[in-house]
Image (spheres, grey):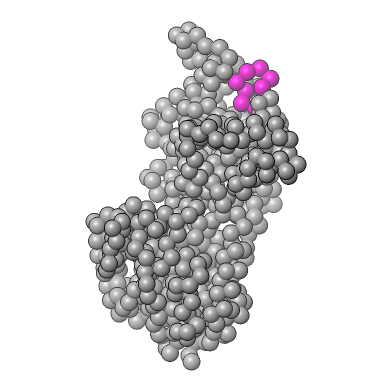
Amino acid sequence: MPAVRVAMAQINPTVGDLAGNSAKIIDFAVRAKAEGANLVLFPELALSGYPIEDLALSKDFLRSSHDALAKLALDLATAGCGEITVVVGYPGFAKKPTSWAIGQNKAAVIRSGTLQSEYAKHHLPNYSVFDEYRVFVPGQDLLTFEIENTKFGVVICEDIWQNGGPVADIAKSGVDLTLVLNGSPFEVTKTDSRLALVQALAKDQSTAVAYVNLVGGQDDLVFDGNSFAVDLTGKEVVRAKQFAEDLVLFDLKTKKELSATSESASQLPEVEQVWNALVLGLGDYVRKNGFKTVVLGLSGGIDSAVCASLAVDALSAKNVFGVGMPSKYSSEHSLTDARELAKNTGLNYSEEPIENVVQAMMTQLPLDGLAAENLQARVRALILMGLSNQDGHLVLTTGNKTELAVGYSTIYGDSVGGFAPIKDVEKGLVWELARYRNSLAKSSGQTPPIPESSITKPPSAELRPGQLDQDSLPDYEVLDRVLELHIEQKLSASEIVAQGFDSGLVESVLKLVRSSEWKRRQGAIGPRITKLAFGRERRMPITNTSN
């Protein structure tokens, strides 16, 4: 059979922006046609953005999506792409709605200005960050179509992660290339499992596979792209970039004969993947929600330094505003480190000492102990929110996953903000990210953004004389490991103790986790990078006296 040139269009849509997403789809289709493509494959729900959550329950939204798809088909033909086949994900009405849902997660096959056929996702995930079974109706049928005597099958994301359904029928249908539309969020180490799964599918069903994934940030999710194609032996033929839009092409002559016609990207080291995921998640949240600038407190510590560096990489220095807010307990090196960070990165920097405001509050409402300490954090929050209201900045809160887990923050104080860039980053990884970003700068002949003393000095909230984090918390290396076992691996106290940890320490840490749920429930969202982040996938009761 003659070779069919397939293009995988890895795009970054915005949820709800049907017109903008359509324009992006047309642009990539035109580019693919110029490269000689016969078929262009787009990701899951590329037309609407993903996930659409309860928008799937809106008749108006589904009707708008249906109309946008019809217009897209005509506009593709007008743009000169009528003779190529475009496969794109979109939400549409179900022929047989259920008592709980009216729409389906679909793939449309467009050619010659019309909708030729469509496929509805069979397996609707209802775990982790996914809630599709509640908002979509499952599909029933397998979709195949032909181009140049080459047979293509279509499935969507979760369909290849579950046994049975359309995947079981691929071999029987004689499919040459299986097209998989995906909205698969990033998490550390997940890319390896995707490849292994697709390789197994190719071998078991005797089919080559094109796996195209979304890229971009959507609320607390980050999609890393990383699309790829394999032949029926599981050999990888081409791979798209991570964390960037991309168009990659390959020629399909037979199931065994796939050849890349565009440059293949390489997999990034793990710490670089995490950094890029955080930058993409932060940048897209700011841009897609209409903000231009961000503001954050700069304490001279490691967390605010990493957050500021992420913001500069995501938005450029001119759009990042850092504020030093020293109290009478702030050490001189804290201000020095904050100023050095501002100089190294080029961000906008100002200082607002808080002592006069704190004293005015203490005169009005005499406080002591922890209440007096927390007042300082809340005064800083007032300053940041005031600047936000005045200048339209989005406030970034700088807490990390370890602190959030045990409640080591002041509610309405250092936890204030609209987005938390390192919310899913444990403390040890914060230091690792700082070292990575500095080494990246050094390797390219630039000034490292993060002062070395911010990395090496003992962390402190500086709310009382000589205060250190370790006065209240176990060593971070031990704490991070206990929390990872409990939160991500879901081990009980006894199971963690069995791995060699002190029982008293474990009980005290888990008690802190339970008693801090009310704080986390009120916290800002942030980009998810682990297999279990605080937020939509970990739903624990606030009132909880369990052991």
Asked whether residue 343 appears in the rendered view, the answer is no
* Residue 336 among those drawn in magenta: no
Quadrant holding the C terminus: top right
Q: Which stretch did the figure color magenta?
A: 460-467
- For the residue pair 450 and 429, the one nearer the viewer reads as 429
Residue 111 versus residue 120 in the image, above or below: below
Nearer to me, 47 or 36:
47
* Number of callouts: 0
Magenta-colored segment: predominant secondary structure: loop
Asked whether 466 falls inside the magenta stretch, the response is yes
Q: What percent of the width, then of the height, locates residue 51?
A: 40, 56
Residue at position x 43%, y 45% in the image: 286
Q: Is residue 81 above or below residue 337?
A: below
Please identify the quarter of the rendering in which residue 231 is found: bottom right
Looking at the picture, how far across and down is residue 145, in whole percent? 39, 82
Residue drawn at (27%, 68%), measured in percent from left and top?
Answer: 95
Whether residue 59 can be seen here: yes
- The residue at 68%/44% (across/down) is 495
Q: Nearer the viewer, residue 83 or 486?
A: 486
Q: Residue at x 46, y 68 (%)?
A: 159
Where residue 171 sits in the image (x, y, percent)?
A: 50, 82
Left or right: 426 as drawn, with respect to 213: right
- Residue ranking furthest to the right: 500
Q: Residue furthest bottom?
A: 1
**Residue in the foreground of this view, choosing between 345 and 333:** 333
Q: Quadrant for residue 148, please give it.
A: bottom left
Q: Position of residue 74 (x, y in %)?
A: 27, 72
